Amino acid sequence: MTNLDVAPLWDSTVYNAGFIVVRPTPMGIRLYLMIRNQTQNSKTLADQESLNIIIKQLLKKRQAPDFRMHILRKHEFQSGYAYFEAPPGRLFPRDKDCSPWKPYCPLVVHNNWIISKSAKVYRFREHLMWLYDGDDRYYSSETRNFLTYTNPKKVAKVRQLSALIAALAIGRLLNRVVILPRFLCGTGPAYECPLNSLIRISTFDAYFKGHFRESSFLGHPKVPDAVKRGIYDGTTELSRNRTDSTRLTSRKLIRLFGNITARVLNVGNLFGVQIIFDDKVENEAFNDTIQKAIRRADYRQHPN
């Protein structure tokens, strides 16, 4: 950087205005004065679009022969698309992202190419790239209990969402936080995908924040060993009390699992399970919340 005025991150298609190194040189200052003047005189021009227009102008040596620019090293500074989506794709953390035969691990991943703060935080958490524990001790709580369930290898999206709804209902009745499974996506051969591939995380988070965790949660280093090891398999109890399409009342569910003290309760496959709250007011309130909370979206969180 000592010989440069500016070094932006390459955002797969353009220079990125959100992650950029600028030195206080005459040309570095001139660049931002030009961007400010251009955006102030336009009602539609965004800062990133303006940055790219001005850089192209300055790179024409006749206009700015002293302008010195280079993009940040692509293997060290990556956009959200380059790190998470570029083939072969990285929808979940991989055990050997950085290895002796792959020495060029990114120094910085710019978590863009996805809409909303909630979705960005969720994606970082899913990839074990989020360390902030918060006042509620998101990872390290010694008292919070959890619920896990599974998705079979072949299933329609709508049935996956029905299973998610059943898990949220069970979590509410048993006062357990739901640890999400991996979901299935694809119109051809199915592949594993995170929840943001199916629904809008910002809307879901508005109604269920604190009541769910990402699928990789138990792999986070801040999660206590007592949680990671304290898993109770309740799949047998559930299967004995269900058929392929079963309605379970809250009273029956609490009778089955209310006395389980394990930190993590695994209930297995919830396909076809519908939870009915015995309290009609509570049942209507929960169903109303579900209707508001689940909105279909694609991976980047555009409405689907």
Image (cartoon, helix red, strand yellow):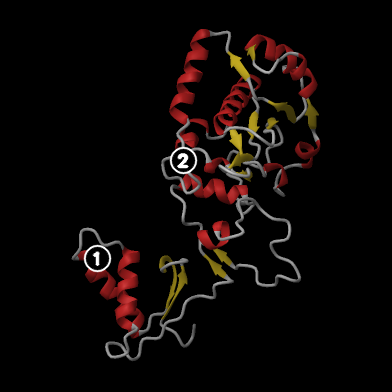
Q: Residue furthest front?
A: 188
The residue where tag 1 is placed is 39
Q: Position of residue 144 (x, y in %)?
A: 68, 32
Residue that appears at 63% across and 43% down: 190
Element at badge 1? helix
Residue placed under numbered mark 2 in the picture: 297
Quick check: marks 1 and 2 in contact, CB under 8 Å? no
Quadrant in the picture for residue 193: top right
Q: Pick out the residue farthest to the left.
A: 41
Check the image and report above or below for 64 versus 78.
Answer: below
Query: How far apart are labels 1 and 2 at the CA level?
Result: 31 Å
* Residue 212 image point, x, y percent: 59, 34
Mark 2 crowd level (few <14, some 14–19, many ≥20, 10 Å Cα): some
Is disc 2 placed on a helix, strand or loop?
Answer: loop
Residue at coordinates 42% horizontally, 45% vertically from top-left? 302
Q: Position of residue 181 (x, y in %)?
A: 66, 37
Query: From the image, which quarter does the C terminus lie in?
Result: top left
